[in-house]
Image (cartoon, grey):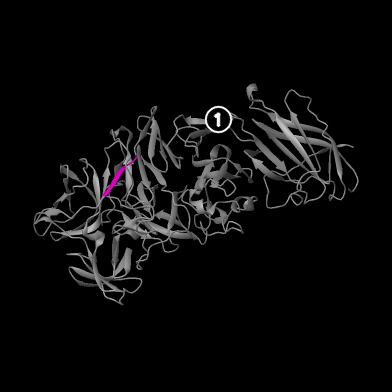
């Protein structure tokens, strides 16, 4: 019998069963397609030899004005910067206290003196006054820079002057209910609110059988000291209670300490009240990890941990910890720097001390410290009108994109000033293609790729609702996927917030690392990959929790679930171990498979090793499996053979079956070429 050539279409297809996928590839591990042929991916080595405290989920490299390259790494508990041969822990130090209210004011002065016996803070740090405090005719709440007087007292500067002198005074809001009524009366001296403005209950208050927490619309203003809000349900008793039991709540940001203490207020799901309802925003039933978002402003790193404030770190500043941007919103889902005008944007941001999941705020152009809109700047805000929360945002090639859990919007610079609506404009690009997870979006060339889907809401045993999406500046459309079921039916939806998109411009690829049910660890242990140039998909196992494409730091960097950082596309090994790639075909048959076939001769062709590097040559193993029927669990015959560059170049496998499967694999680098084999009909059974 004459030789036949094994002709297999590029790309992996698991949507079709093996018989229907005749002439296709059905399984893969650590491969990519190049000129239509499968080959092993590049290897990886440790980029930094020190193990981090937990997996790296955010990675960002940049160069300072002296050309030194720095890399910021965000883990579950810390932020490190690596550069100039050193690793620095710049994690902001955050402490929460609940002291007795002890504020002092002087009539006509903006200086306020505060006593807090619970903590000593350092000069030059900041405090977030979480509970509104009325004192001396003013109300204090939000972020303030502090000046130390002694170990237990400090001063802040109010935005307005006190109208009276008070010594060791002040009071937090009180809440009064009437049995059977939805109306709650709030007492806060000189509150300054108007009807239909938002009031934030920043510390949960239990009163009259109700628990108040989140953002509320002010229904009516009774007088300068009193207003009303409406609860979701009627009170069961008449009662009065003070916020935080009458104590203040302070969150200190100690920028000059050198050890990580703890995170308190403002991390995670705190204060996500539904606007105008007073109900607590309940995110999908997914594991929430406190993700860091990074961007750069010149040589300055800007960083924000989800649910917290915004910080900066500059290499040559001598800062041991990241510095708080006191003028920025105190609670945010994340940040990015928008172009073409240099503007810092925060999403899932906050007003009145309450996080508003759909709120986008931005600084004025060229100044990330100025967030208060005036007629002379372009700072402002916009509430996205659809979805329940902003999941993530990214600066794309032509415009910024804002993703809710339902839809996607573009954010475009308009150039106006004095009004928020004139500075930046928002346009809905598409419905029902919101982002599944904060880091599940990336840019490759001019195209934005992401996974859309209602995270945490799917039955892992049934069909999923996730899908791959692309936006190229003009059209938002689904990206057809030939391995869809393999990915989404194995996705650990409870940990879907950990999904990370990973562009690899060196090979025109976009991967998504995701936690799998089959892995069972809750961490990203698997990947799916799309090759833009080849229009092919493949998938496999590789634990990576964070990623950065090639950058000022060199080759792509991946954060392993083991706490190490790895440089990718380096060499042909898995950090010194065998790479162990593999790819398996669908069915190979004679005609329509009505006859058994017998294969007794095989002449494969391979591209061996890295060109010009003989030491990279490694063997390739081929296993041919023969099946009689499509529902056979195990092959009826099977033959494995190993080929080397110096070998004979052929093999005599002797495999019989109605349909055959060819599986190639090896420990190092190789690319498949022409595979010729001799087969003959061999009866029906």
Overall secondary structure of the magenta stretch? strand
Magenta stretch contains residue 327: no
User: Residue 326, how many percent across, how many down?
Assistant: 26, 48
Q: Measuring 21% from the left and 40% from the top, which residue is drawn there?
A: 122
Towards the viewer: 418 or 159: 159
User: Residue 118, how many percent across, how many down?
Assistant: 21, 47
Picture layout, residue 659 above or below residue 82: below
Towards the viewer: 102 or 278: 102
Q: Quadrant of residue 636?
A: top right
Q: Measuring 36% from the left and 65% from the top, which residue is drawn there?
A: 275
Instruction: Answer yes or no: is residue 35 visible.
Output: no
Tell me how many marks there are. Answer: 1
Magenta stretch contains residue 93: yes
User: Residue 618, how many percent across, how many down?
Assistant: 67, 27
Picture layout, residue 171 above or below residue 264: below
**Would you say 206 lies left or right of 480 here?**
left
Q: Quadrant of residue 378?
A: bottom left
**Would you say 106 lies left or right of 377 here?**
left
Towards the viewer: 315 or 79: 79
Which SS class for mark 1? loop
Range shown magenta: 91-96
User: Which residue, given by chain and number where applicable, does mark 1 sit on?
Assistant: 575
């Amino acid at each position: 019998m004459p030789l036949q050539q094994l002709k297999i279409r590029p790309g992996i297809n698991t949507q079709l069963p093996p018989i229907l996928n005749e002439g296709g590839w059905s399984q893969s591990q650590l491969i990519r397609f190049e000129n239509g042929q499968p080959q092993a991916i590049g290897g990886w080595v440790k980029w930094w030899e020190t193990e981090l405290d937990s997996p790296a989920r955010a990675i960002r490299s940049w160069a300072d004005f002296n050309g030194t390259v720095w890399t910021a790494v965000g883990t579950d508990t810390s932020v490190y910067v690596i550069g100039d041969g050193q690793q620095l822990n710049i994690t902001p130090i955050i402490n929460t206290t609940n002291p007795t209210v002890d504020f002092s004011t002087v009539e006509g002065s903006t200086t306020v003196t505060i006593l807090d016996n619970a903590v000593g803070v350092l000069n030059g740090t900041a405090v977030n006054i979480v509970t509104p405090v009325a004192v001396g005719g003013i109300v204090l709440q939000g972020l303030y820079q502090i000046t130390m007087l002694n170990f237990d007292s400090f001063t802040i500067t109010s935005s307005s002057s006190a109208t009276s002198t008070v010594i060791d005074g002040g009071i937090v809001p009180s809440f009064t209910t009437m049995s059977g009524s939805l109306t709650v009366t709030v007492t806060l001296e000189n509150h300054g609110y108007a009807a239909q403005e938002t009031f934030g209950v920043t510390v949960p208050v239990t009163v009259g059988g109700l628990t108040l927490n989140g953002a509320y619309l002010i229904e009516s203003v009774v007088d300068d000291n009193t207003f009303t809000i409406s609860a979701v349900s009627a009170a069961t008793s008449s009662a009065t209670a003070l916020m935080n039991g009458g104590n203040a709540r302070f969150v200190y940001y100690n920028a000059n300490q050198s050890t990580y203490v703890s995170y308190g207020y403002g991390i995670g799901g705190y204060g996500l009240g539904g606007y105008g309802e007073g109900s607590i925003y309940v995110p999908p039933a997914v594991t929430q990890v406190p993700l860091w978002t990074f961007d750069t402003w010149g040589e300055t790193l800007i960083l924000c941990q989800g649910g917290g404030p915004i910080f900066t770190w500059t290499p040559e500043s001598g800062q041991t910890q990241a510095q708080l941007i006191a003028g920025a919103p105190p609670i945010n889902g994340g940040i990015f720097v928008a172009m073409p005008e240099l503007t810092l944007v925060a999403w899932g941001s906050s007003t009145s001390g309450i996080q508003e999941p759909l709120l986008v705020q931005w600084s004025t152009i060229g100044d990330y410290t100025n967030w208060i809109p005036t007629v002379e700047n372009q700072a402002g805000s916009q509430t996205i009108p659809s979805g329940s929360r902003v999941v993530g945002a990214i600066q794309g090639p032509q415009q910024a994109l804002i993703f809710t859990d339902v839809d996607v919007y573009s954010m475009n610079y308009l150039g106006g000033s004095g009004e928020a609506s004139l500075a930046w404009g928002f346009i809905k690009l598409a419905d029902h293609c919101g982002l599944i997870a904060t880091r599940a979006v990336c840019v490759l060339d001019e195209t934005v790729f992401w996974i859309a889907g209602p995270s945490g809401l799917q039955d892992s045993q049934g069909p999923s609702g996730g899908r791959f999406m692309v936006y190229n500046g003009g059209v938002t459309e689904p990206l057809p996927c030939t391995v869809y079921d393999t990915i989404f039916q194995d996705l650990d939806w409870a940990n879907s917030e950990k999904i990370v998109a990973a562009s690899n411009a060196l090979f025109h690829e976009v991967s998504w690392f995701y936690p799998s049910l089959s892995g069972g660890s809750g961490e990203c242990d698997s990947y799916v990959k799309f090759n833009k140039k080849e229009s092919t998909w493949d998938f496999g196992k590789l634990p990576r929790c964070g990623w950065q494409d090639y950058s000022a730091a060199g080759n792509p960097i991946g954060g392993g679930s083991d706490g190490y950082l790895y440089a990718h596309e380096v060499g042909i090994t898995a950090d010194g171990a065998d790479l162990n790639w593999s790819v398996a075909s669908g069915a190979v048959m004679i005609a329509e498979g009505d006859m058994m076939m017998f294969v007794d001769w095989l002449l494969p062709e391979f591209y061996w090793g890295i060109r010009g590097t003989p030491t990279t040559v490694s063997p390739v193993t081929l296993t041919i499996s023969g099946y009689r029927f499509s529902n056979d669990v195990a092959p009826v015959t099977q033959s494995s053979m190993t080929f080397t560059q110096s070998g004979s170049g052929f093999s005599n496998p002797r495999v019989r079956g109605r349909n055959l499967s060819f599986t190639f694999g090896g420990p190092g680098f190789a690319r498949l070429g022409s595979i010729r084999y001799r087969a003959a009909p061999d009866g029906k059974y």
